[in-house]
Image: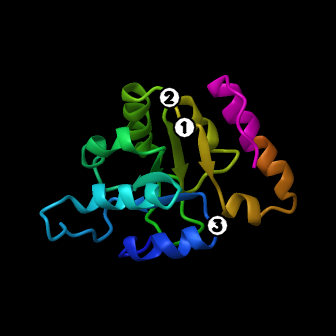
Amino acid sequence: MVTHPMVWVKPMADAGVDSFTFHVESHMPIDSHGGDGISKLIKEIKAHGMKVGISVKPSTPISSILPYIPDVDLVLVMTVEPGFSGQSFMGDMMHKVKQIRTLFPTLNIAVDGGLSPATVNAAAEVGANVIVSASAIFGSSNPGSVIKELRTSVERLQGVQLLQD
């Protein structure tokens, strides 16, 4: 999570990034023409040829991003406070995933924070189709098997074949 995501758009595009996800809580002031800073950021990301993701922290209500969802490619629901790897999965955030999935049935919905083979089903069952996992993968003696298990759970519960990078 960065404080001023707008300053990172061009450097990320120049580095070849194809998707840029920002936290709605980041500092995005109203521009000099009275425009919405979030809308301006979304347009800037798209102008640089990247897909757009918008993220919400655990304490942020989904209502804060609803107006922007039609203009983004992905919503990321955080189940931990950003910035500290190894935190426990907050299952009570799954109501946000379910609400977004109900309103936007074809949207990519990611969940980040404490995702592991033990918690992935809770996210996938309510509609998450993109899983962000660090500690469970990098802390494993067999990262490939953890990735496969996460992928298999989401594919089974979503009934779709996920894209592989």
In this rendered view, identify the residue nearer to me: 55 or 73.
73
Q: Which residue is mark 3?
A: 16
Crowding at dot 1, Cα within 10 Å, few <14 / some 14-19 / many 20+, comes out as many
Residue 14: percent from left, percent from top = 59, 72
Task: Specify the amino acid type for callout 2.
Answer: Thr
- The residue that disc 1 covers is 128
The quarter of the picture where residue 24 lies is bottom left
Q: How far apart in space, not on screen, are marks 1 and 3 (Cα)?
A: 26 Å
The residue that appears at 54% across and 57% down in the rendered structure is 113
| Residue that appears at 44% across and 58% down | 47
Q: Residue at x 54, y 64 (%)?
A: 87
Tell which of 157 and 42 is nearer to you. 42
Left or right of 99? Residue 153 is right
Q: Is residue 45 above or below residue 118?
A: below
Residue 162: name its quadrant: top right
> What is the image's colouring?
rainbow
Relative to 75, is 129 on the left or the right?
A: right
CB atoms of marks 1 and 3 within 8 Å: no
Depth check, mark 1 against mark 3: the one in front is 3
Secondary structure of residue under mark 2: loop
Span colored in magenta? 150-165
The image position of residue 73, as x and y in percent, is 48, 44
What residue is pinned by disc 2?
106
Q: Position of residue 71 (x, y in %)?
A: 37, 43
Residue name at image x 78 percent, y 42 percent: 149
Type of amino acid under label 3: Gly
In the rendered structure, which amino acid carries the disc numbered 1? Ala
Dot 2: within a 10 Å radius of its alpha carbon, few (fewer than 14), some, or many (20 or more) residues? few
| The one of 111 and 43 positioned closer to us in this rendering | 43
